[in-house]
Amino acid sequence: MFDIPQLDLKGKVSDAEWQTRVDLAACYRLVAMHGWDDLIYTHISARIPDSEHLLINAFGLAFDEITASNLVKIDLQGNIIDENCPFEINPAGFTIHSAIHEVRHDAMCVLHLHTNETIAVASLEQGLLPLSQYAMFALASMSYHDYEGLAVNPAEKLRLQQDLGMKNFMLLRNHGGLTVGKTIGDAFMHMYDLTRACQIQLQIQGTGQPVVLVDQEIVDGIRAQANIVHTGLTGGQKSWPAMLRKVYRADPHFAR
């Protein structure tokens, strides 16, 4: 009950796959460190470079138990690639992530969480409002998806794909938040922005005072700036090494 199968895949997979495993395991640990995890639920997936295979968490492990070696490799149909893998995956997590990976070949990473703040703002009729700089980054590429119950219905995949389109942020009504990124670092920074935006909005609305909304013209102009600040070499990739160092300091065992 308490023993987790110990795997060691270092040197047994390609260098590209191993680096993806390390980065993805670090992302899981960062989510736990920020208090964004939800017991054993929610998921972060990443595509292995130059393949149609994905990595996702083993169902039943807490996020602070995820390591590079115990991430599960699956195909787009949800089949586990290694027949000797001792773990299973969560079907609900697979539905959402496979839907996006099927059509967003530009997105290496898909991050879906159930934080209180993203659920709360996703459940407001107006959704995310232009109330903070963090909101500007998210609103530059925001989408919404209506709640359809537990995400285990394959028919929902098409609607998820259509609602996301080429956007990088999504609020799933009554459910939570989702971000995608060209790298794992980009997807993490997008979720950081979205979560902070939702936190600040709820704090502002909680005062009961009149709010100052940013003009739509400014929101529209943020897109190019957001692409510079939190994407690519000057964004997610610039901050990602610092995030990796943070995880290594906390527990270097994640990279095993």
Image (cartoon, rainbow, N blue to C red):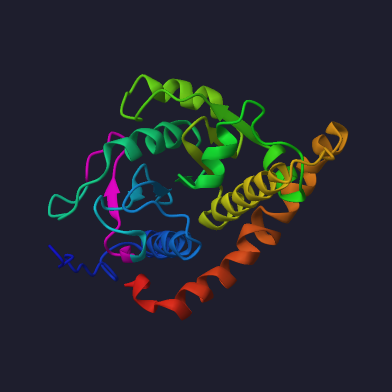
Majority secondary structure in the magenta region: loop
**Horizontal side, residue 26 vs residue 64: left or right:** right
Locate residue 252: give its quadrant. bottom left
**Horizontal side, residue 232 vs residue 68: left or right:** right
Residue 63 sits above or below residue 221 on the image: below
Is residue 249 shown to the viewer in this render? yes
Residue 157: where, in percent of width, then height? 40, 25
The residue drawn where x is 39% and y is 62% is 25
Which span is picked out in magenta?
A: 65-80
Is residue 165 shown to the viewer in this render? no
The residue drawn where x is 55% and y is 50% is 187
Residue 25: within the magenta?
A: no
The residue drawn where x is 15% and y is 68% is 3
Residue 77: where, in percent of width, then height? 28, 33
Residue 207 sits above or below residue 242 on the image: above
**Residue at the farthest front position:** 208
- Front residue of 35 and 184: 35
Residue 135: where, in percent of width, then height? 71, 44
Residue 79: within the magenta?
A: yes
- Front residue of 205 and 131: 205
How many tags in the picture?
A: 0
- Front residue of 210 and 195: 210
The residue drawn where x is 74% and y is 48% is 226
The quarter of the image holding the C terminus is bottom left
Residue 36: where, in percent of width, then height? 47, 55
**Residue at the farthest bottom position:** 249
